[in-house]
Image (spheres, rainbow, N blue to C red):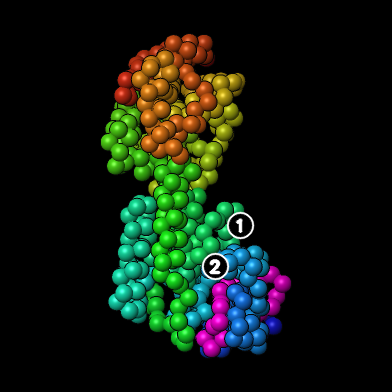
Amino acid sequence: MSEGLSFLPSPELAVVIPAWNERENLELLLPALRETLDGLRASWEIIVVDGGSSDGTAEAAVRRGARVVQQEALGYGGALLAGFAATSAPWVITMDADCSHRPIFIEELWRRRSEAEVLIASRYVAGGRADMGVFRRLLSHVLNRTYARALSLDIRDLSSGYRMYRREILQNLSLIARDFDVLEEILIRVYAQGWRIREVPFHYSARGSGRSHAHLFAFGWAFLKTLLRMWRLRNSVASMDYDHRAFDSPIPLQRYWQRARHRIVLGFVEAARREKQGPVLDVGCGSGRIIQDLPEAIGMDILLPKLRFLHERHPRVLQGDIFALPFPDNVFGAVICSEVIEHVPDRSPLFEELTRVLRPGGTLILGTPDYGRRLWWVLEWIYGKVLPGAYAHEHITRYTRASLIQRMLTHGFTIRNLQYVGFCEMIFQARKASDR
């Protein structure tokens, strides 16, 4: 790679390095980094974010071909945000200035960049290792295992700062953390949006000269606050896999509810299959287990994060609006619409669209809470208190058994069956008129 390409206006790759009094380490790191980047056959730039160094860090970085950005917001998180804002490169690598992240590993990250939107140089997956003291290693393991377990994440090394990001996923992140805990917050928010995260085995080396800038008490307090905030996010509907995880929820009532609904809906689908009514559509499929357990069905949802999550588990999904279903008339033998209609206004053409895409004689499987039953009002209040970020406060249309039956009869359906989950969520099996 010719040296002139390293300063193109729009490089393909940017390497962001937060630094505070790291002159000696940068004098060793930057030449090796430039050599590695020159071998990638891609245009690149190096951005050193200087946090107010007094040892000549900025001057050393410029002498060795880096662009220096002065950090304004405090903390490690502030440094990362400044680096992200300073580049338009479609791929961004973050690494430490202390020589603990060997530049040669960038070759592996770059080679695997199409595998995920975030690649983590991971110390704790098979093949990875870390040269750290016993105390620091213990703290690192406790931190990572606590976060992974509390937040139901299958990620071993959430605290690694050596990563590659696809830039588009960083643009709309709303980050609160400003210390080292920003690393966990970035990953969890990216994960909640349904983007792919992969860990790549990595050998972490001891830092070069100088001492770590992390202060234990402040470090621990910041991580605890971020853990609590991220727990609320992971247990809210803003997390793309909320529906998926609810099936195995540690809350018994939530687990029962999900599994009872799953059993009833799949039973109605099986009845439609026995009658050979045709293909199945799940409208508002979310990230739940119903669509995942119907491999031949088509899932549709308006929320892209849920579809990103589903795609590897069930590729037959697409984005769409219940008021304008992206399908021709009379194409499906069964349409599932479970726990959707209470979230949208009760207006035309909601039921007209559900009717239109069904074949004559096809089955509509329609589920929603029965607001005619006092028990539901009580459960919804409790649900809102226990899981304030869940669905309880999103219900804007309240159907009763009588009002929903009337709506379906008006659109030419015959009610074939009605079952309840917990005595207050109604799931109808209805048949479209054969002559419509």
**Residue type highlighted by circle 2:** Gly
**Residue type highlighted by circle 1:** Gln
Which of the 4 image quadrants contains residue 203? Answer: bottom left
For the residues labelled 2 and 1, the Cα–Cα distance comes to 20 Å
The answer to whether residue 23 is left or right of residue 162 is right
x, y (%) of residue 277?
A: 40, 25
Which of the 4 image quadrants contains residue 184? Answer: bottom left
Q: Which residue is mark 1?
A: 171
x, y (%) of residue 1?
A: 62, 83
Q: Which residues are magenta?
A: 6-26
Q: Which residue is mark 2?
A: 75
Q: Is 307 rendered above or below residue 35?
A: above
Label 1 neighbour load within 10 Å: few <14, some 14-19, many 20+: few
Residue that appears at 39% across and 74% down: 202
Residue 19 in magenta?
A: yes
Residue that appears at 29% across and 42% down: 250
Residue 213 in magenta?
A: no
Q: Is residue 142 visible?
A: yes
The first of marks 2 and 1 along the sequence is 2
Q: Is 404 rendered above or below residue 382?
A: above
Judge depth for marks 2 and 1 and give the one in front. 2
Residue that appears at 65% across and 86% down: 59
The answer to whether residue 46 is left or right of residue 238 is right
Residue that appears at 69% across and 83% down: 4
x, y (%) of residue 417?
A: 34, 16
Element under label 2?
helix
User: What numbered label is drawn on residue 326?
Assistant: none
